[in-house]
Image (tube, rainbow, N blue to C red):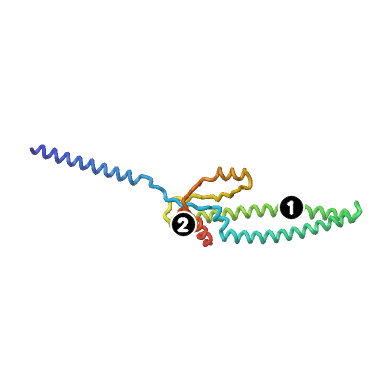
Amino acid sequence: MKNSKTTIFLAAGVALLVLLGAYQQGKLNADSEIKPAKIGVVDVTKVLENSAKNKQWQEKMQQEQTDTKNRFNQMRTEFEAIQANLKLRTPGTEDFLKLQQEMVEKGAMLEAKNKFYQDKVTFEIQRWTEELYQQLLKVVSDVAKDKGLDMIIADESLMLPSPSLQDFMLTVKTRKLLYHNKQYDLTDEVLVALDKTD
């Protein structure tokens, strides 16, 4: 009888250990399971285009373009005046050659400045867009953390009708988010947060 009690006690102990082991393993498996991600959506194009920061920068660039255009118009007027004056001169004379040299130099200067300005504008647009995009990424990260989100997906505005079939096909090929419930859209919140940054 003593042996049977010991056997029962040992069996109960083993069963308890097995149950505890199974429970621990189940708990470990449950803890290591990947839970569904909490996701938000941001329309990057809308934020970048409607940002007050971007509008201020565009106004500054517009003023710079107007000033540059005025300088180019002044140079072009001077160039055209030399051209008109050259037509009044006798070819081969000293005055004619002097004016021709001045016209060629002004034309080359006008062309060089135009090329430089185009390159400068392209560089400034790229630099500003990269800087604003970096700020946007930081703001998106901050908003996501504040809301306890795991992931933010970019939603790009689709412009229809597209300017061309090529533009439309490029949008279709690169667009990843086809639908989302508007409750997950953080675009306006990110836009406000971006404009508050320095």
User: Which type of secondary structure does the marked residue at label 2 adopt?
Assistant: helix
Q: Check if mark 1's residue and mark 2's residue have beta carbons within 8 Å.
A: no
Residue found at the far front of this picture: 161
Amino acid found under the numbered disc labelled 1: Ala
Question: Which residue is nearer to you in this view: 74 or 160?
Answer: 160
Left or right, 22 with reference to 127 = left
Q: Which of marks 1 and 2 is in front?
A: 2
Left or right, 102 with reference to 22 = right
Residue 27: quadrant of the picture: top left
Q: In which quadrant will I find the N terminus?
A: top left
Residue 169 on image: x %, y %: 59, 43
Question: Which residue is nearer to you in this view: 6 or 156?
Answer: 156
Residue 75: quadrant of the picture: bottom right
Residue 135 on image: x %, y %: 53, 56
Amino acid found under the numbered disc labelled 2: Val
The residue where tag 1 is placed is 112
Residue 12 on image: x %, y %: 17, 41
Residue 44 on image: x %, y %: 54, 52
Pointer 1 local density, CA inside 10 Å: few below 14, some 14–19, many at least 20? few
Left or right, 91 with reference to 29 = right
Earlier residue among tags 1 and 2: 1
The residue where tag 2 is placed is 143
Residue at image location 52% in from the left, 62% down from the top = 196
